[in-house]
Image (tube, grey):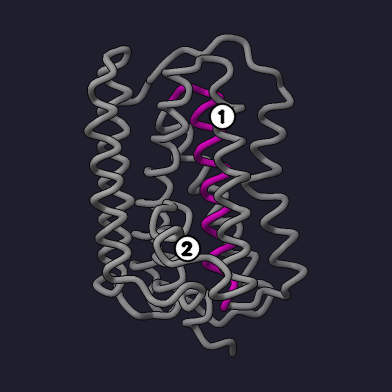
Amino acid sequence: MTTILPPADVPRAAWFIAALAGFVLPALVLVLLEGERGAAGAVLAVGLMGAGMIAGAIAGRLWTGVALALAAGTGLLLLTLGLGMPTLPHLPETAVALAVASLSFAARGALFARSAGARGWWIALGVVGGEAAMVATAAAQPGALPGWLLALLPAQWATTALQTALAGSGTLAAAPVLLALGGTAASTLLVAALWPRRWPYLIMFSVWIALSALVHQHQSPPGQASLAAPVS
């Protein structure tokens, strides 16, 4: 599925906000943190979410969101390396985490475009802001948020997947969160494809809750994922 909805006219400012949320602000955070490896997963996840979800909602095209999320993620990763993070220990695992997370976020943006038209990007912006705030809180203050709450957040799933890849722990260690990201992407695209039927929402939310339970069962204590990789 490529085109979800040809959206109505969207202000040019929306694309500026997508760039701001997807790359500019995360890049600024990385510079302020001087490329600290322990925070890279959270920053990359927020960047992917901002670019993929907002762009997908603006364009109404799944693959536009995926492409821009991957571009933002790659740029942020290169910036992190330029700021002094050691060479990636397992590039294929990092690429898998980037791709799956980008698809998951872009799928949600595409659904917002399908269900809300030109207003979809506003919904995406609100979701990005809310999840980013909780991911940032979890990274800055481990234990401040309960584990069950973090297990509900796709942005936190992406954080864990990316931080695990950056730490060189292998794809198997991130399997629950990668499965959760992929599963929610599939169920979200099902809802978008069958819109305006509402019953697929029941499938989507059921999948989300089931996969959140899987993540919760296998997750580390809150905040631990962001500290898993040693800073060199």
Closer to the camera in the image, 73 or 105: 105
Left or right: 146 as drawn, with respect to 28? left
Which SS class for mark 2?
Answer: helix
Identify which residue is drawn at 56% across, 29% down: 123
* Quadrant in the picture for the C terminus: bottom right
Identify which residue is drawn at 66% across, 72% down: 82
- Given the image, on which type of amino acid does mark 2 rest? Thr
Estimate how packed mark 1 is, as few (under 14), some (14 to 19) or many (20 or more) residues with alpha carbons within 10 Å.
some
Q: Nearer the viewer, mark 2 or mark 1?
A: 1
Residue at label 2? 159
Instruction: In the rendered view, tell whether residue 25 sits above or below residue 37.
Output: above
Percent from the top left, x then y, of residue 163? Answer: 46, 71
Quarter assignment of residue 26: bottom right
Percent from the top left, x then y, of residue 211? Answer: 26, 53
Which SS class for mark 1?
Answer: helix
Range covered by the magenta-colored residues = 38-61
Secondary structure mainly formed by the magenta segment: helix
Percent from the top left, x then y, of residue 86? Answer: 55, 82
- Given the image, on which type of amino acid does mark 1 rest? Ile
Quarter assignment of residue 9: top right
Residue at label 1? 123
Estimate how packed mark 2 is, as few (under 14), some (14 to 19) or many (20 or more) residues with alpha carbons within 10 Å.
many
Left or right: 31 as drawn, with respect to 107? right
Closer to the camera in the image, 56 or 42: 42
